[in-house]
Image (tube, grey):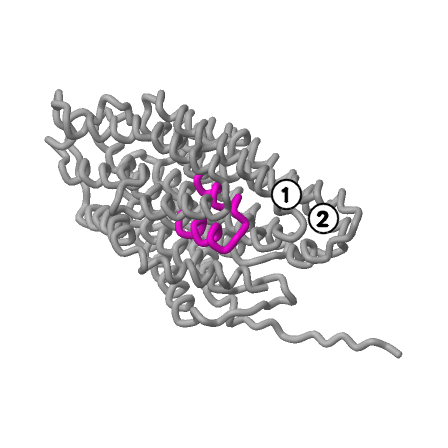
Amino acid sequence: MEQIIKLEFPNLWLLLPEMAVLLTGFTLFTLDLLYKRLNHALAISVSIVGYLIALLLLLFNWNLQGETFYGLYHRDSFSNLMQAFMIALTMLLLGFSYSYYKHRKSLYGEFYYILNFALAGGMFLVSSYNLIVLYVALEAVSISFYILTALLRSDFNSKEGAFKYLMLGGLSIALASYGAGFMYLYSGSLDLRYILTHIGENKYFLVLGLVLFLIGFAIKIGAVPFHFWLPDAYQGAPTPITAYMASVGKLAFFAPVVRLMPYVQEHFAHAWVITVSVISALTMLYGNLTALVQKDVKRLLAYSSIAHSGYIMAGIAVAEVIGLKAVLYFLLAYSLMGFGSFMVLALLERAPEWENKLEQFSGMRFYLPWLAFSFMVMLLALLGVPPTVGFVGKALVFMSLSFGSLWWLAIVMIVATGISTGYYLRITALMFMKDSNRGRELSVSNLEKFLIVLLVVSVVLLGAVPIILWNFVSFSAENLFMR
């Protein structure tokens, strides 16, 4: 008797935000083809309208959950939360980008639709358990970042950073692909949930595949010892793109690892805790110790980003609900702090002869008091000083480590945070406790001032009233563990 396979039409309602973003990208691509020189006001307007539509579709269908395209795509509260932050940060980026690229004489129409495709790839990356979809989404984000990193005209550092990112980025995707291949060879399935819940006795291919898969993502997030590309890429890239990679990029690349957390308890809990804990400790210590001796503030913040990957991985080491809650909160907190700190540098780079050198921050409160205060808030948030969102994030990770009896890693986290005090407070002291040799002229639009203030208020408000974000984070984490 023949078996009848019933094919159902995919539920496109679950894909509406992604469809809006993709349609916006293809619209921008078409406009760039039609016009030799794309009108940047038009491109920004089309982008903002498209992102607003995607965000509204996401908010109006916030409680809509489920799978579509036969399990290839999965929408839940976790993907909704991550995508909402991604879209919001992309819109903020557009508010800073035009003036920056105009100052650097690198205005290209390609910027808008490549940025759009990076966002679309990130949205798919946080919303699937399927290995093929994860691979395609990872390629979309990575290739977009390679191009965006090299988008500064006649800037050797930009090209060098992009080349190093391309080389190690290609290696990471190759390793993740080999890992996916071994996992498929073991299970005959492309679904991570099925692979990690149907485990037999001989699991050598599964372990090898899982290790290669995770190493691929460890390179992307800049975990030690897979971090070598990150400082050069962050320093060479246009600073708004550095901010984007440090925020949206981190959200996208951490998401598949976060989705694995509920599935490692039964068979891999011990190995997971040991491996992730050791990598986390190395990443925290190396990132902060190396940042301590940097003279270029942009490179300093790049190493700070590496250290924060270590803090996030400390929470991932605790493969429990409390660890997942801490990870989600810290991820979202760092996306705001990292984005805001790099955006302050993006504004400062428009000042004459500005090179992001440490000594150039001396006495900044005398000639740019509002920007000095904003940068100070971001630095204190990265350090974890209350009442900023960074303090809540680190406190949650510390509590999750104590819950998981990982006291040695909690002590390493405290030591690493103490080391970071040296460079965060040094910049703050330079800005507010040193005299200025000369002032610097800097033209900042009212929109840019408003966006910086918005970021500062968000960093403080979410720290002072953490319940605003905690309810979403808590529900998302609990929902991931209900399998």
Q: How many marks?
A: 2
Q: Was residue 139 drawn as part of the magenta stretch in this picture?
A: no
User: Which comes before the other along the chain, label 2 or label 1?
Assistant: 2
Say whether residue 307 is left or right of residue 360.
right
Task: Identify residue type, mark 1.
Answer: Phe
Q: Which residues are magenta?
A: 311-330
Near mark 2 (Cα within 10 A), the count class, few <14, some 14-19 or many ≥20, is many
Residue drawn 30% across the image and 27% down it: 423
Near mark 1 (Cα within 10 A), the count class, few <14, some 14-19 or many ≥20, is many
Residue drawn 65% across the image and 39% down it: 212
Residue drawn 35% across the image and 36% down it: 239
Say whether residue 7 is left or right of residue 289.
right
Q: Which residue has dot 1 on it? A: 213
Residue 400: percent from left, percent from top: 45, 48
Say whether residue 374 is left or right of residue 138.
left
> Residue 104, relative to residue 471: is it above or below?
above
Cα distance, mark 2 to mark 1? 9 Å
Q: Are marks 2 and 1 in contact (CB under 8 Å)?
A: yes
Q: Which residue has dot 2 on it? A: 183
Task: Identify residue type, mark 2.
Answer: Met
Q: Quadrant where the N terminus lies?
A: bottom right
What SS does tag 1 mark? helix
